[in-house]
Image (tube, rainbow, N blue to C red):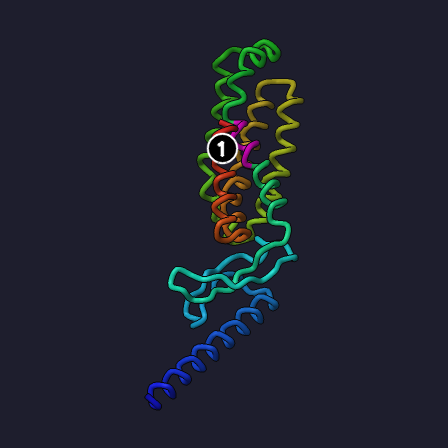
Amino acid sequence: FYRANIFYRANIFYRANIFYRANIEQKSRFLKGGDVILSKGYDGKKEVPMSTSAIPPQESTIIEQTEAGRPQETLVHQHRWLILATVIIGTFMAILDIFIVNVAIPSIAKGLNTNFSAVELVIAGYTLAYAVLVITGGRLGDLYGYKRLFMIGIAGFTLSSASCGLAPTIPILVVARVIQGISAALMYPQVLSIIQVTFTGRERNIALGVFGAVIGLAS
């Protein structure tokens, strides 16, 4: 019994020491601008690389239990619901613009004095540009930061939307729609990544549910 007690205490001390060293190493790498932000287990063997630009500067640290019952340190942003509202607006616009032009086809053909074949380019220009570049947009977010790519995408999407509304001819409208599709491809893939790094546990499930509901509403 005495030997078992000594062994138990040594085991507890060893695990606490490993967790403390892993915690210090993770925080030091984060303060130095490293790429590791989330999920380092107490044994220090499991890492999930995330871009530091994905999470704005104000965050709090919580300790949650992993599936194996091991403690896990996670950074959670204090204004996470405001972040969710912002990225959900971008999601709504990106999906809505795939379908919204279908309603305006007669008005576009009449107002720009063109045929329906040219108007089809307005629809296809956005969809093709978005479909071709959406995977590339996700990869760029991994490389350069989810927040940065989302901001670039939503800025380009806003400017190209204004250009679509002011386009005097059908060629300008088609070009504006292609730029709009490219911007949506940069913006949309970052939404899920931002949700993943901003929320944890039950709140993440709620955020993903809101994300899915908005996609259905926009469609």
Name the residue located 51 percent from the left edge and 28 percent from the top edge. Answer: 217
Name the residue located 61 percent from the left edge and 60 percent from the top edge. Answer: 60
- Give the magenta part as a residue range: 91-97
Most frequent secondary structure within the magenta stretch: helix
Q: Amino acid at mark 1?
A: Ile
Q: Mark 1 sits on what residue?
A: 215
142 and 87: which is toward the camera:
87
Q: Position of residue 146 (x, y in %)?
A: 55, 49
Q: Position of residue 104 (x, y in %)?
A: 56, 16
Q: Is residue 9 left or right of 38 when viewed as pictured? A: left
Q: Residue furthest bottom?
A: 2
27 and 16: which is toward the camera:
16
Name the residue located 51 percent from the left edge and 38 percent from the top edge. Answer: 210
Q: Is residue 154 left or right of 68 when viewed as pictured? A: right
Q: Position of residue 206 (x, y in %)?
A: 50, 43
Q: Is residue 136 left or right of 158 when viewed as pictured? A: left
Q: Position of residue 191 (x, y in %)?
A: 53, 43
Name the residue located 48 percent from the left edge and 42 percent from the top edge. Answer: 208
What secondary structure is found at the residue carrying circle 1? Answer: helix
Quadrant hosting residue 114 = top right
Q: Is residue 35 visible?
A: no
Residue 87 within the magenta-colored segment of the rendering: no
Quadrant (top left/top right/bottom left/bottom right) for the N terminus: bottom left
143 and 213: which is toward the camera:
213
